[in-house]
Image: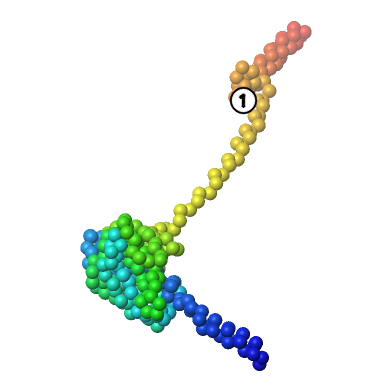
């Protein structure tokens, strides 16, 4: 191997070893937040982290930090994410797990604010903010390089990420999120059909001959014909009487 070839090969090895490896952990998002029951109890709260591909988390520890509406840090929760792959990870209260049928991987021990923010961060390796989500009215943004916004969910509901947009719907821990459209998108009415041409009237049958022109009805035509027949019989009878009288005179 020439000196030139050796130098090129060494340079390539250095470049490859120095290139940063993009961990799949960056796909994890704050996917769902619930704040209270339908009756307003904050004993039922949870935050669900979601990774669409079930990717590995090679640089633990990973934490979830909760901020208030002004952007002040309230609580930091250390997760058990690390090494193994994960699709969903729920931080929730004990009562939320009982009422909604799931087991929290990390217990929430402080009350989530009505208007607040949550940031998922990597504290191992090169620390970095992976994703932040703010719900409700925010007056100061928590430090982070990504911030999505959504509404503060009403009691008994949660705010959920669907296709990169946050909707308020019935809570769906450990299940696919919902945009609140139970019956799907509205159907489009078919275009109106065009009425066909009106049916043609049937041809009028002419009255029988001899009808009354003033009131052309078939029954009147029949009555005129009957009168003409009686008149003919009367004339025939009169003719017979005249002929019989003439014969008697000749005798």
Model colouring:
rainbow
Q: Quadrant of the C terminus?
A: top right
The answer to whether residue 101 of the structure is visible from this angle is: no
Q: Nearer the viewer, residue 178 or 133?
A: 133
Q: Secondary structure at mark 1?
A: helix
The answer to whether 96 is drawn above or below residue 60 in the figure is above
The answer to whether residue 185 of the structure is visible from this angle is: yes
Q: Nearer the viewer, residue 62 or 48?
A: 62
Q: Quadrant of the N terminus?
A: bottom right
Q: How many other residues sit within 10 Å of disc 1, few (<14), some (14-19) or many (≥20)?
A: some
Q: Which residue is situated farthest in the front direction here?
A: 3
Residue 98 x %, y %:
25, 72
Residue 51 x %, y %:
42, 72
Q: Which residue is mark 1?
A: 218
Residue drawn at x 68%, y 23% as measured from the top left: 209
Q: Quadrant of residue 196?
A: top right
Residue drawn at x 44%, y 63% as measured from the top left: 164
Residue drawn at x 36%, y 72% as measured from the top left: 121
Residue drawn at x 23%, y 60% as measured from the top left: 40
Q: Nearer the viewer, residue 191 or 91?
A: 91
The answer to whether 172 is drawn above or below residue 225 in the figure is below
Residue 95 x %, y %:
24, 70
Q: Is residue 251 left or right of residue 137?
A: right
The answer to whether 67 is drawn above or below residue 220 in the figure is below
């Amino acid at each position: 191997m020439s000196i030139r070839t050796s130098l090129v090969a060494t340079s390539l090895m250095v470049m490859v070893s120095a290139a940063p490896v993009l961990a799949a952990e960056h796909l994890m998002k704050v996917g769902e937040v619930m704040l209270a029951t339908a009756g307003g109890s904050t004993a039922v709260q949870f935050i669900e982290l979601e990774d669409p591909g079930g990717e590995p988390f090679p640089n633990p520890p990973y934490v979830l930090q909760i901020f208030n509406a002004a952007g002040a840090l309230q609580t930091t929760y250390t997760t058990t994410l690390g090494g193994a792959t994960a699709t969903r990870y729920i931080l929730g209260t004990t009562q939320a797990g009982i009422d909604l049928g799931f087991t929290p991987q990390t217990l929430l021990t402080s009350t989530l604010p009505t208007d607040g923010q949550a940031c998922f961060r990597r504290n191992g390796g090169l620390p970095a903010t992976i994703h932040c989500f703010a719900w409700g009215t925010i007056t100061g943004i928590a430090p982070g390089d990504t911030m999505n916004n959504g509404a503060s969910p009403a009691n008994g509901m949660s705010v959920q990420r669907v296709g990169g947009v946050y909707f308020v719907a019935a809570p769906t821990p450990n299940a696919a999120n919902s945009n609140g459209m139970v019956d799907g998108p509205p159907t489009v009415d078919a275009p109106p059909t065009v009425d066909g041409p009106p049916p043609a009237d049937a041809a009028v049958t002419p009255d029988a001959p001899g009808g009354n022109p003033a009131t052309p009805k078939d029954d009147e035509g029949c009555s005129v014909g009957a009168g003409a027949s009686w008149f003919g019989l009367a004339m025939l009878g009169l003719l017979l009487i005249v002929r019989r009288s003439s014969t008697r005179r000749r005798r």
